[in-house]
Image (tube, rainbow, N blue to C red):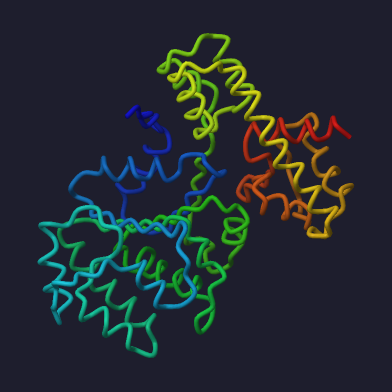
Amino acid sequence: MKRIKFHDRKKEIKEIMNILDTEPSLITFIYGPINSGKTTMISHLIEQLPEDYAPFYINLRGRFITDYEDFLNVLFEIDEKGVVDNVTEYARSMLNDLGTVSGIPIPVNLFEQIFEKKDKSKDMFKYIEQFFTEISKNRVPVLIIDELQVIGDLKIDGLLIYKLFNFFIRLTKELHLCHIFAVSSDSLFIEQVYSEAMLQGRSRHLLVDDFNKVDTMDFLNKHNFSDKEKELTWNCCGGKPICLVELANAKMNGKDIESEAKMLVKIRTSQILSIFDEISLGKVEHSEKDIIEEFKNFEKEEIIQYARVNERKIFLVGRNVLFIDPVQRTIKPQSKLNLLAIREVINSE
């Protein structure tokens, strides 16, 4: 089976490794437009980590979480064979065989004890702290939670996300025990997190954007694109990894790049136009004029500064048409494809 290899993210990986080389002190939020390669980069990074680190990777993508039972089942990797009453003893026994895990290992009996407690969060956090404390005597724990926004609105005796933030602050800034990375492509969630008072001075934000032109051309050169094909691809996709991979696969299968690129723009234009169908059917509260007004911001510009975010922008961010960067206070289309589609919609008016 043909497979597109990981394209190097030297700058971002170097920045993360610099963080990992220092004492844990801040929560790191990794954010960026959808399909910019955040999860792929993290997966590649985990594979390259020295044995000094113990990564725990939890991906909430596609998980339906409505209560503590759901969350605990995602957060922990239950060891059905392990029946241990002492967390320290269990953590020591795991050290030699601890590879990359999809949750925090826990013996089934301790998991059941937490599940039976009335205040589950207290016992859950206590177990994780004790487990990481023991692990940290030999290796540096690295907790990575992908698509954290999935539990952003989950209320269990108050918002679960705030309990997590408080616990993350304890693990990083107070105990310097564990590196924590929270990954999200939901820019509205990141905007909310960025302005959260409890995280001021306790978190940092790392943008993983689409590739720049130099890196895009390097990727396309590896897949034998002609100069004409490279310019067509850049003008259509920009540096959006998923789009570049799609055209690279088309190239390997002998398809015409120009035709494929035009089809991608056509499909995305049609998807954006469907918003106006929803407006006509009364499914969207914004008017067609409102949406066009927002689109006209990008008639000549690819990125704009914002002072405040209005409801129309929030709607278009929520529909993955626009991307908001709260750190730079900028808004832009989620991709070059979206930019071209927006301009097609404007021109059709």
Residue 65, image x, y percentages? 47, 70
Instruction: Please report the residue visible at 32 percent of the width from the left and 88 percent of the height from the top.
Output: 116
Q: Quadrant of the N terminus?
A: top left
Residue 203, image x, y percentages? 48, 58
Q: Is residue 286 left or right of residue 150?
A: right
Please tell me whether residue 252 is drawn above or below residue 88 in the rendered image: above
Count of marks placed on residues: 0
Looking at this rendering, what residue extends furthest in the bottom direction?
118
218 vs 78, nearest the viewer: 78
Instruction: Please report the residue visible at 35 percent of the width from the left and 29 percent of the height from the top.
Output: 3
Instruction: Please report the residue visible at 27 percent of the width from the left and 76 percent of the height from the top.
Output: 127
120 vs 270, nearest the viewer: 270
Residue 309, image x, y percentages? 75, 54
Looking at this rendering, what residue extends furthest in the top direction?
227
Please tell me whether residue 250 is drawn above or below residue 122 in the rendered image: above
Q: Is residue 341 left or right of residue 16?
A: right
Please tell me whether residue 8 is drawn above or below residue 277 in the rendered image: above
Q: Quadrant of the C terminus?
A: top right
Instruction: Please report the residue visible at 68 percent of the width from the left and 40 percent of the height from the top.
Output: 332
Residue 8, image x, y percentages? 38, 30
Q: Is residue 216 left or right of residue 124?
A: right
Location of residue 253 by image quarter: top left
